[in-house]
Amino acid sequence: MTAAVELPALDGRDTLGFLAALGVLRLLTDEAKIETRLSFSESNANAILHSPLTSIDEVVDILVHVVDHIPSAGAIPGVPAGFPQQPGTGKDPMRVPRDQLRRTFAQLADGQRGPEACRWLAALLTDLAADREGRAALTPYSAPGGKQSVRSFFVKPLELLRSKEPATLVREALVRWRRVDNYTGENLDHRVLRSAADHPSGESVPAGVPGATWLAIMALPMLRLTGNGTNPQATLWHNVVGSRQPIMVWPLWRQPLDSYAVVALLEHPALRPRQGTDAPVVPRAGLAPLGVFFVGAAARQPVKGAKSAGVLAPTRISLVD
């Protein structure tokens, strides 16, 4: 029997909500081995799971089971505890020169759970592009700043999940978000930015949603990473003539799709934006046959005083006939 379970906190019109919905789909499918499909409500854009699970309680139980099976020293479910590698006193050991990334893949492939670790590495780094220091380029879904590393991208939200009863924060991620002070949200959520006027202390304090952030990061293996020789390219990210930086463009769809069908939809050429008069546009005609009823967009917004690419923030996009 298949039941439809709506997740009221995962509004697909929101960047973090959409990515977190993908993360739930991937974890249930790949880690819990539960046949699951995903759609979105046309009335409120909430994510809807279609699976044998009949309630949010059951979904929470399965996701907590996944969290509980990550080793205490681990960072990602289903891979060795030492991946991604822990930074020492020097630079991030995961940020290798472009020409050394294949060696890293070979070392992982020969180790325990090699294929799973390699799948994650391929979602994080590519030698088809390089940063200013000549290192293998990071996925545009990651925008580290300061002392953030590839490993801390995973560990920080996981530590916050574990710091309290994991079921509480997982439930909040699916039902009603509660923000945690001094958490940056790994730059996936522009709402972490709060001015001094927004906080009782009178100071500017970031406030993120660790459960939703962790779920969003778990979606990365579904989002293919490649490059054009110079710049990284990833599923949903597009360069548009007239735009100063790449933009992330994602669809919401009405029909239940499994993870393979979702990947195919996210990579469909009908979703590629083009230059419009005032903002990027996507032709409406190509979307109807795909069951797509909404298209959202986001771009990196620089943060004053932060040494990173910035937070993911909504940007304008239009559907045109």
Image: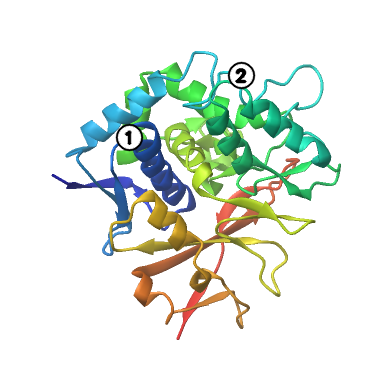
Q: Amino acid at mark 1?
A: Lys
Q: How many marks?
A: 2
Q: Is residue 235 left or right of residue 87?
A: left
Give the label on residue 48, or none: none
285 vs 117: above or below: below
Badge 1 is on which residue? 33
Residue 27 location in percent, x, y? 39, 36
Q: Is residue 7 left or right of residue 286?
A: left
Residue 85 location in percent, x, y? 67, 23
Q: Residue furthest right?
A: 133
Res 304 visible: yes
Question: What residue is at 49 percent from the left and 47 percent from the top?
Answer: 222
Q: Residue furthest bottom?
A: 321
Question: What residue is at 60 percent from the left and 34 percent from the top?
Answer: 118
Badge 2 is on which residue? 82
Question: What residue is at 37 percent from the left and 28 percent from the top?
Answer: 169
Q: Could you say whether the residue bearing mark 1 is in a helix, strand or loop?
A: loop
Question: What residue is at 46 percent from the left and 48 percent from the top?
Answer: 19
Q: Nearer the viewer, residue 246 or 180?
A: 246
Q: Is residue 124 left or right of residue 89?
A: left
Position of the C terminus, as image quadrant, is bottom left
Q: Amino acid at mark 2?
A: Gly
Q: Residues within 10 Å of mark 2 (few under 14, many from 20)?
A: few
47 vs 203: above or below: below
Q: CA distance from mark 1 to mark 2?
A: 24 Å
The quarter of the displayed image where residue 63 is located: top left
Q: Nearer the viewer, residue 81 or 145?
A: 81
